[in-house]
Structure formats: C-alpha cells, structure tokens
C-alpha cells in the first residue's frame, strides 16, 4: 500500500491510497466465491454456480463491492500509519472518476479520501481557577410568587370595557417588532423581536425589567414604544446590555376574574389542600435553586475554559453536525409545545444562523474537555455508564421500559460516554478550583433557568 498526504487549508487533508494489484485480485476472488455460494442464477443449483459465470453475470457489482471492501480495510490502516485522527466522516472517491468507483482485477486500485483531522489541543487555563458559587434559600416571597404565577395560569380573563386602561394583572395581546438602538440613535430589528398576537400578563415578571410596567395605562388601539435595556446576563449574548425599543400596537386588554386559589380550587391540580400545594412549591423552589446554582457555576467554568482556549481551529464537519443537531432539537421543542415555526420570532435562516456560535462553543469545549481528561487520566468506567443508564431510565417515567430496551443496545449505551466524561471532568475541575460562596437573591439566581 502506498499513501500520499496533502495538507489543505486549516485542518483539511487529502490522502491518496494505492492498493497493489495482488490485494485487488485476492479481494476479487474472495468476493466471487462468496457470491457463488449465495447467488441465484437460472439453470444452476444454489451454491453450485461456477465462479466464471458469477464473474460474467455480476462483474459490475463485484467491482463495486471490492472497491468498498478495499476502502474499509486500507483507509484505517493508512490513517494509522500516518498517525492521523480524522474528525467526522471522510469523503472517498475514485482516483479515476471516468471509470467510476470500481476495482479492476490485475490492476492497482487507487482512491482518494478527503477529511478533516482533529486539532492538536493541549488544554490551558484549567488550573488555579477561581469560581463563585452563587446560592439562595427559598423564601416565603418566592413561594407566594409561585402561587401567584399558578393563580395566573389558572385564571380566566374577560375583555375590559371599551376605553379602559391596562392595569397590573391584565392580559394584553400585542403585535409589533423589537429594535436595538445604536449609539447614533438608529434602530435595527433583531432576530426574535417579531411579536404577533403576543400575550402578556402585566406584573407576571416574565419579560425583561421595565417591559410590562411600560404598558400599564395603555388602551386598545394605542401604539406604544416600550423602551428597555436588556439585562447584562441576558441569554442572547448579542442583546445583553443593549438598549432597545419595542414598537407595539395594543390589540386586546382582558382583566382576570377574581378567583384566588383555595382548598377547593387546588383539588383540580391533585392537591388535598392549599398548604399541601405550598409545601410542594417550596420543595420545588429548593430543587430549582440548587439546579440554578450548579448551572451557573458550570457556566462560569466553561466560560473560563473557552476564553483560555481560543487558539486552535475547529473541524467544520463536527461544527456542522452539532449545528444541525441544535436545529433539530429546536424544531422538536416547537413540535412538543405545538407552536408554529413563526414562534421563533425570526426567519428560519436567521434562527439557524443564531445557533452557529453555540455549535462552535460546544465543539471547542468538547475538545478541551477531552484534552483535560487525557492529561489528567480521567476515564469513563463501565460502572459510570451503568449509573448513567439507570439515571436515564429513572428520568423516563412512564417510558421507563422503552428506555430500558433502548439502552440494552451497547451502541446506544456508548452514546452516554461523552456526556458522562464531560460531567466527570467538570466535577474534577470544580473540586480543584478555588470556590467561594456568595448569597444572592432567589429571583436573580433563577434567571439562570429562564
């Protein structure tokens, strides 16, 4: 076998591989014999078809099958000999496109593989990390807020009289567009800012600070400019800390019917008493705050790792695969919530493009995590996979049996090795970091989960 590697731009490589004619002939003979034992040809008993007849009748298929077989055998060998670790699937084609992807008996077989290699990553900046663990305790105010939200979710609304002004607790239906405001005063529409038949409950706290307050006092038919500034920790980083204006038209104003929660009303939710519901809400708040603390700490860690490891190229094939997976997940979420594609608030092209930075971040951090695991000899054991499978089955709830059957397949179990390794590396890094604890408000901490 002869190989020649050509270096392209960045991580791109092209490898030409030539398999000697003797190997081609051996594969041809093996393939012909295998087909002779199974092929059905009129006039011959099964398994008794002469090799010559098989070769004459099935020549093109044999040539294609042998070409594929040679690639499967010699490409891994060539990569190993040249110490190349490829990222994603290679693109393989014949050295002679006019003849197609076929092998010819008695001739060398040459094929070309185009692929990306993994970058040589040596993780930096993961020792001596200083992290802040932000925590909070569930307060009575938090439980009351949860009750208020639940009350709002269960509330029914009735249109207010003509000319009535919107007040706290009212439900408004609005249509409009959001714009970022530039330093020179110019405005630019942003992805996700297109609101159509958008419902807002004033005082719910579901929107960014100042948004709901600006609509108090509005009337049906009014056109209102809602001027706000996105929070510094807003989930869309391109909007964080940016001043903006939402130009809205008020389509409808409805007032909630006065129906406070009671022992009787919570029975439809499956609770015996209002106090029983409050107890569950408090436990849920503890769980949410704990989750938010862990997520916030992990995000600090990942931000630090990403900032310290920006000096290597990313395999675009892996980025594209991750990008597609993120988009499929977003479509699936829309489907589960029974929302139309318009609920994205932007064009499909803009929505897809907005996911590219996250795909790049995930691939970069995955490579950094793998490097840390290699350096620090952090490995995933069989017991780690078993624990992860058990957790997945437990989380499946009513679909536990389907999950159990799914993970009975070793390949499906192996899919958990990446996330498990990331969790082990993350845990190791946090354990080694200098972590200080800071108490913050519950509402501020819970923004992590929004």
Image (cartoon, rainbow, N blue to C red):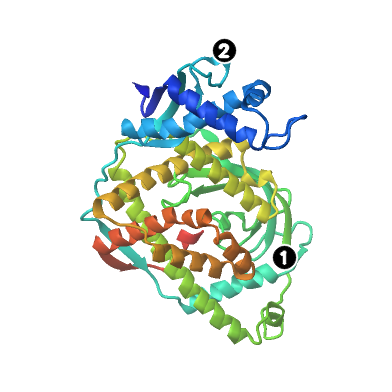
Nearer-N-terminus badge (2/1):
2
Q: Inspect this view and state whether residue 190 appears.
A: no
Query: 291 left or right of 215?
Result: left
Q: Tag 1: Cα neighbours inside 10 Å, few (<14), some, or many (≥20)?
A: many
To which quarter of the image does residue 99 belong? top right
**Above or below 345: residue 422:** below
**Nearest the eye: 425 or 42:** 42
Residue closest to the eye, 70 or 27: 27
Give the residue drawn at x 49%, y 76%: 141
Query: In the displayed structure, would residue 394 be above or below residue 12?
Result: below
Q: Which image quadrant is residue 309 in?
A: top left
- Name the residue: 62% across, 37% down: 348
Judge left or right: residue 80 versus residue 38: left
* Quarter in which the N terminus is drawn: top left
Residue 286 at what x, y percent from top left? 46, 74
Please tell me whether mark 2 sits on a helix, a strand or a loop: helix
Mark number for residue 98?
A: 2
- The residue sitting at the left extreme is 128
Between 417 and 119, the one nearer to me in the picture: 417
Residue 445 on image: x %, y %:
42, 64
Q: In this view, does 89 lie above or below 332?
A: above
Q: Is residue 335 left or right of residue 442?
A: right
Residues under labels 2 and 1: Cα distance? Answer: 74 Å
- Would you say residue 413 is visible in this rendering? yes
Where residue 384 appears, as percent x and y from the top left, is: 40, 64
Classed neighbour count for the residue bearing mark 2: other residues with Cα under 10 Å, few (<14), some (14–19), many (≥20): few
The tag on residue 255 is 1
């Amino acid at each position: 076998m002869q190989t020649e590697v050509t270096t392209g731009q960045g991580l791109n490589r092209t490898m030409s591989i030539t398999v000697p004619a003797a190997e081609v002939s051996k594969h041809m003979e093996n393939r012909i014999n295998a087909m002779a034992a199974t092929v059905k040809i009129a006039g011959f008993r099964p398994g008794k078809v002469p090799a010559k007849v098989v070769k004459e009748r099935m020549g093109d298929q044999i040539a294609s099958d042998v070409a594929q077989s040679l690639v499967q055998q010699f490409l891994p060998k060539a990569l190993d000999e040249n110490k190349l670790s490829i990222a994603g699937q290679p693109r393989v084609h014949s050295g002679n496109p006019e003849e197609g992807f076929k092998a010819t008996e008695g001739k060398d077989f040459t094929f070309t593989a185009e692929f990306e290699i993994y970058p040589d990553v040596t993780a930096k900046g993961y020792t001596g990390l200083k992290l802040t663990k932000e925590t909070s305790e569930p307060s009575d105010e938090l439980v009351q807020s949860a009750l208020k939200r639940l009350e709002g979710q269960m509330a029914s609304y009735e249109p207010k009289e003509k000319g009535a002004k919107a007040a706290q607790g009212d439900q408004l239906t609005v249509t409009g567009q959001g714009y970022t405001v530039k330093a020179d005063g110019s405005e630019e529409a942003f992805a996700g800012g297109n609101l159509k038949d958008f419902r807002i409950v004033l005082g719910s706290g579901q929107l960014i600070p100042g948004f709901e307050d600006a609509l108090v006092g509005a009337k049906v038919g009014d056109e209102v400019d809602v001027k706000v500034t996105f929070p510094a920790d807003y989930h869309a980083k391109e909007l964080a800390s940016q001043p903006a204006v939402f130009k809205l038209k008020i389509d409808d104003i409805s007032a909630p019917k006065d129906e406070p929660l009671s022992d009787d009303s919570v029975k439809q939710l499956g609770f015996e008493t209002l106090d029983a519901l409050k107890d569950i809400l408090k436990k849920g708040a503890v769980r949410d705050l704990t989750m938010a603390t862990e997520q916030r700490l992990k995000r600090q860690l990942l931000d630090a790792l990403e900032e310290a490891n920006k000096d290597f190229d990313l395999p675009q094939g892996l980025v594209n695969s991750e990008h597609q997976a993120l988009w499929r997940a977003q479509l699936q979420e829309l489907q589960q919530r029974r929302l139309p594609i318009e609920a994205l608030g932007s064009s499909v092209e803009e929505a897809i493009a907005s996911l590219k930075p996250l795909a790049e971040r995930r691939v970069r951090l995955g490579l950094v995590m793998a490097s840390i695991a290699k350096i620090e000899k952090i490995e995933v054991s069989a017991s780690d996979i078993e624990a992860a499978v058990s957790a997945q089955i437990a989380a499946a709830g009513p679909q536990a049996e389907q999950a159990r059957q799914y993970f009975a397949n070793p390949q499906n179990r192996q899919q958990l090795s990446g996330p498990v390794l990331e969790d082990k590396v993350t845990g190791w890094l946090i354990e080694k970091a200098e972590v200080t604890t800071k108490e913050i408000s519950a509402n501020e901490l819970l923004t992590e989960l929004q």
